[in-house]
Amino acid sequence: GENVEQHPSTLSVQEGDSAVIKCTYSDSASNYFPWYKQELGKGPQLIIDIRSNVGEKKDQRIAVTLNKTAKHFSLHITETQPEDSAVYFCAASEGYQKVTFGTGTKLQVIP
Amino acid sequence: GAVVSQHPSWVICKSGTSVKIECRSLDFQATTMFWYRQFPKQSLMLMATSNEGSKATYEQGVEKDKFLINHASLTLSTLTVTSAHPEDSSFYICSARDYRTTSGSGNEQFFGPGTRLTVL
């Protein structure tokens, strides 16, 4: 089955700096890679996703890159704000198969 | 956007009792709903996949007789924790997939807000 590794487990950045979270996956058949933001006591919220036919996708301050050859994908948050503080999960899936989650990254943005 | 609700948001029960958690897709029809369990500071662990009108598919290690799942309609799935014990205390989260999605793999899942279960 799919295995998704995520690094780092915790990340502290100064407000205004950029944050990068990296994930690797094991199943070369995976073709859908969503990223979720989870605030304390709440369910995960989809913030951006990318499919295997695209190398990069951007939505305002958030961008995701995908390297299919290396089986790496990353989340980039620019101009971080305190409200970006949360736990972020990457995930991977193939077609309509179940989604496998990474272990999560706790991001702290220091004002 | 796609909205998923859960009820209740939190529940406290005595050991040995059963608890039912509801998951609803509010503005779309979901042929598939997923149930996850999340322990503190850990990732989401898939418990089962629920397809409307058919039996749920449970992940390895999840007791199907203890965690009863019913998906009777395209907008409602329920998870019943039977004979709950303190070790069942956790954050239970459902998600739903919109079968109408036609772009790409159509595998977007939308999550509910979660249900905090505490078994005394």
Image (cartoon, coloured by chain):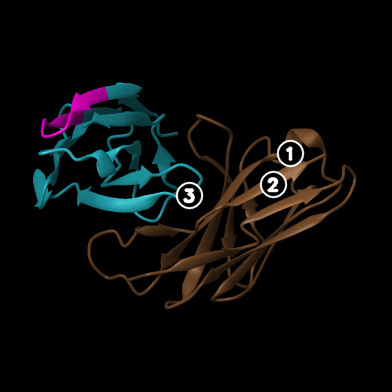
Chain colours: A cyan, B brown
Q: On residue B117, which mark appears? A: 2
- Residue B7 drawn above or below residue B35: below
Q: In this view, does A62 lie to the left or right of B1?
A: left
The residue range painted magenta reads: A12-20
Secondary structure found at label 2: strand
Q: How crowded is mark 1: few (under 14 residues within 10 Å), some or many (20 or more)?
A: some
- Picture residue at 55% right of the left edge, 70% below the top: B24
Secondary structure found at label 3: loop
Q: Do labels 3 and 1 share a chain?
A: no
The one of B119 and B77 positioned closer to us in this rendering: B119
- Picture residue at 34% right of the left edge, 58% below the top: B108
Mark 1–mark 2 CB contact (< 8 Å): yes
- Name the residue that disc number 3 marks: A42
Secondary structure found at label 1: helix
Instruction: Name the image quarter holding residue B27.
Output: bottom left
- Picture residue at 41% right of the left edge, 44% below the top: A39
- Residue A59 drawn above or below residue B1: above
